[in-house]
Image (cartoon, grey):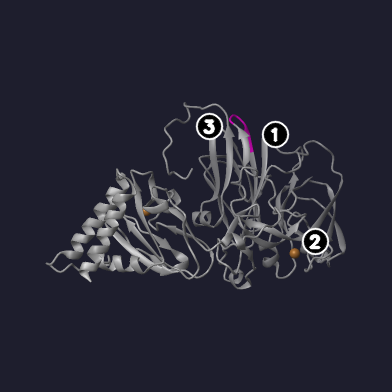
Amino acid sequence: MMPRARFFLFIVVLALAACSPEPSALEQQAAQATASALQTASAPTPAPAPTATPTGAEVALAVEEADVAYTLVTGGDYGGLVFVGVGGEIDGVINPTLTANPGDTVSITLINGDGVEHDLAIDEFGVSTGSLTELNQQTTVTFTVEQEGEYVYYCTIPGHRQAGMWGTLRVGNPQSQAAVGENIVHHPADLPPPIGEREPQMVRVTLTTQEIEGQLADGTTLTYFTFNGTVPGPFIRVRVGDTVELHLRNATGNTFIHSIDLHAVTGPGGGAVFTQTNPGEETFFTFKALNPGLYVYHCATPSVAHHIANGMYGLILVEPEGGLPPVDREFYVMQGEIYTVQPFGTLGHLDFSMEKMLAEAPEYFVFNGAAGALTREENALRAKVGETVRIFFGVGGPNFTSSFHVIGEIFDRAYPFASLTSPPLTDVQTISVPPGGATMVEFKLEVPGRYILVDHALSRLERGLAGYLYAEGEENPEVFSGQMTEGSGH
Ligand code: CU
Ligand code: CU
């Protein structure tokens, strides 16, 4: 066994040397690591101490038996917290996409290239290299892949994945499973203008419930339940004292009964008792907006949590007498959870999971209906330095309280529980918003840059919950200056 291993490693070193006449630093590093493994494997005495790291011989065998073999070295000088490919087509590529076919045995050799603790894991295959703590330490994992799909390999050391230590393992041609649906994202700048000074009046609102095959993430769709085709539904804006005639149409061809409960309503079920509406039918009721505030509305047809999780929520603003103080920009953002049978990141059409909903174990967390929706160029919030921004923020849920925070900003004014008749809190970092609740926050933009909307329960960031607010304008070094670092994730 020993001579065979030695021979194999010799070939590896030769092959690396043959790749280019002047081996890159990477290749030299890999060769060094391989050479040191060779020494370990061939040392006659003493017997190696028990360790989780396989010997060079075991590595060589595993690599030899694999259908595809890849070597990755951890970043260091090659770009910070990243994996860098070694040899073959991935040589020198940062976080290379690794490919394999269904049924292949895959081996991945990880080399510690920077002396910082790292590992490599792929959750779906239960693969983990274990920690590599020392420079040039290496280990190999071998596993078999069956299901077509795209899987994430990443470093599990806290913060490393977020900083950029992850890449994709593509098995087969998963794009053949990708699904395309309709855009259900409600644009955060799409809301009616302020009402301001006017007398109370009669307001007619018509909402249509639509069941839509919508885009949840790239290549991933879900059957959404919506008001007017978007998540959240339309932003309804009235003033205190207005009388609202609310019509609910359930689109022809829908499968489910739908209804509406508006928290701004004083009356049975918030309207839900009068609006249980069959597909193809219409119902209505009338209410007077007695209390100013920012209120959640949602479908209230059993299972209510199911209808909410699938997208049936929105906000209604009842402006106080005389309206709200003027601001330069207003935005409309709502948070929700999505419960699917298939794990987060699966391509294709995903099915709703009642079991996960009852266990309150969502696969996705979303702002405005889809994974990362508000990080996309076309949906991001945009404003200018010097402007005052107001965000109407609500939680549809159905279950999770949001710790709403904007990274890099402080809320100059925050209205807890969206009580607009109480004085606001000032200088708030994070505000708690319960399911079926809302808040209104305001702040002035002083410094240009990208600000990130999050729920500060930050695990949810990994499941799709983030949005960008871009502030354009002149630098303001008196308030903030510095040199941007790589890998911050900002
Ligand atoms: Cu790491
Ligand atoms: Cu419904």
Question: Which disc number belongs to residue 326?
Answer: 1
Q: Which residues are magenta?
A: 385-389
Q: Disc 2 on helix, strand or loop?
A: helix
Is 417 in the magenta? Answer: no
Q: Does 260 sit left or right of 483 as displayed?
A: right
Q: What's the amino acid at mark 3? A: Val
Q: Which residue sits at x=25%, y=59%?
A: 10
Question: Which disc number belongs to residue 271?
Answer: 2
Which residue has dot 3 on it? Answer: 447
Label 1 vs 2, first from the N-terminus: 2
Q: Disc 1 on helix, strand or loop?
A: loop
State yes or no: discs 3 and 2 in contact (Cβ < 8 Å).
Answer: no
Taken as a whole, is the magenta stretch helix, strand or loop?
loop
Is 386 in the magenta? Answer: yes
Counting every numbered tag in the picture gives 3
Q: CA distance from mark 1 to mark 3?
A: 21 Å
Q: Residues within 10 Å of mark 3 (few under 14, many from 20)?
A: many
Q: Which residue sits at x=51%, y=56%?
A: 462
Q: Does 225 sit left or right of 467 as displayed?
A: right
Q: Which quadrant of the view contains residue 386?
A: top right
Q: What's the amino acid at mark 2? A: Gly
